[in-house]
Image (cartoon, grey):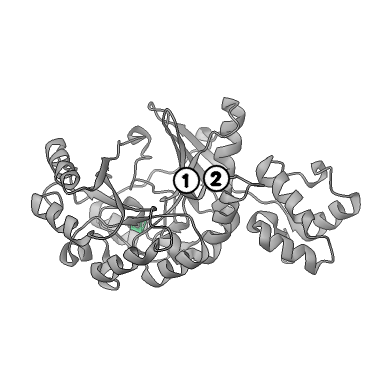
Amino acid sequence: MTDQQINLFDYDRQSLRALFEEMGERAFRADQIIKWLHGRGVTDIDQMTDLSKSLRSKLKEISVIKLPEVVQSQHSLDGTRKWLLKLEDGNCIETVFIPTKTHGTVCVSSQVGCALNCSFCSTGKQGYNRNLSTGEIIAQLWFAHHSLKEETGLDHPVTNVVMMGMGEPLLNMDNVLPAMNLMLDDFAFNLSKYRVTLSTSGVLPKMRELAEKSDVSLAVSLHAPNDELRNILVPINKKYPISQLMDVCRAYFKDEPKRSITFEYVMLDGVNDKPEHARQLIEILQGIPSKINLIPFNPFPHAPYKRSTEVSISKFQRQLMKAGFNTIVRRTRGEDIDAACGQLAGQVKDRTQRSAKWKAKHNVVIPIVKETETSNV
Ligand code: SF4
């Protein structure tokens, strides 16, 4: 790839149409390319047979089709899959596929590492390197969709996408938005807006912007019902406290009152799982159409927390349900391959030095991926 060449994976339909118009080409050519690339999974321009020969030659001059490399593919005993994708700069990110009887969900990363350092999250401990490009974000769904389609023979092996992998998606909005457009595009992955969910820790100005620009579903990583506790668990709360977050949530789906926001709440033993926490949660969520996901904590090496007991999780759930909140306990999946929620680590070249400090403090050795473990999907 030369400096002048573009990566076609970085474009959604709208931006590719604009590019084609600038080039003096008909805009509908962009639709055809989106269909080949994402809908059919074809990455060889010469196989795009409904484009003229001259357009194909022009495209090969000005563009490339660049995807990360799959360097590791793991299967969990419960059917969960995890792929380690190596990016051009040597960083690695992880993508997970979680099948159930009726759904197939892909959990997509938006950044290499994460700058927000939530205290219960393994990704946060890896530090932060950079934002993913649109191409690197959509490639995660592309790999999962096309490889599973070939393996299973199903037309739509992926039914849902959650932007809940590594990173805070709203701190990479410029690249995340076109990727989500491709997820919804009927020429690409054709997923419903109810089945593509962006999860945020509460970057309020960006949440307001998202409400204007996209109609995907929203999840909020809440994890604590008061500022004192949330400042520790989700430090961005110091900048955007709970009362302001709840105001934004209250207004979020004002034009679609039947839509609700999912609130994620990791269950940490003795930390945020007491009856008084449930009472406070009920209070702050008043007036917000909500679903609550209780997530039993998934430990990682040297994690400072323990998972709540089953008894306290079900008591907590009952208390919320009694108050009228639709509350589910998320089943832990893929624990044997470290693919469970909050466990994604990848291999991040940390620019923040946070991981070095943390590893030194806890004497942690991060394993290197061996070539022999490499398997292309
Ligand atoms: S929970 Fe999300 S926002 Fe917080 S550190 Fe982990 S990846 Fe970042």
The reply to whether dot 2 and dot 1 touch (C-beta < 8 Å) is: yes
Q: Quadrant of ligand 1?
A: bottom left
Instruction: Classify residue 335 by image quadrant.
Output: top left
Residue 259, percent across and down?
A: 39, 53
Q: Up-down: is 114 above or below 156?
A: below
Q: Is residue 312 above or below residue 88?
A: above
| Quadrant assignment for the C terminus | top right
Q: Secondary structure at mark 2?
A: loop
- Is residue 81 toward the left or the right of residue 282 in the image? right
- Residue 137: assigned label: none
Left or right of residue 250: residue 112: right
Q: At 19% across and 51% down in the image, what residue appears? A: 304
Q: Which mark is residue 191?
A: 2
Residue 27 horizontal/vertical position (percent): 78, 60
Q: Picture quarter containing residue 36?
A: top right
Q: Looking at the image, which is closer to me, 175 or 60?
A: 175
Pinpoint residue 83: horizontal percent, then vertical percent: 49, 40
Residue 87 in sight here: no
In the rendered view, does 215 fall on the left or right side of 311?
right
Q: Residue at x 73, y 61 (%)?
A: 17
Residue type at tag 1: Arg
User: Marks 2/1: CA distance?
Assistant: 6 Å
Residue 217 or 364: which is nearer the viewer? 217
Instruction: Residue under label 1, please give it.
Output: 195
Q: In the depicted view, which residue is nearer to us: 267 or 117? A: 267
Determine whether the residue tagged by mark 1 lies in a helix, strand or loop: helix
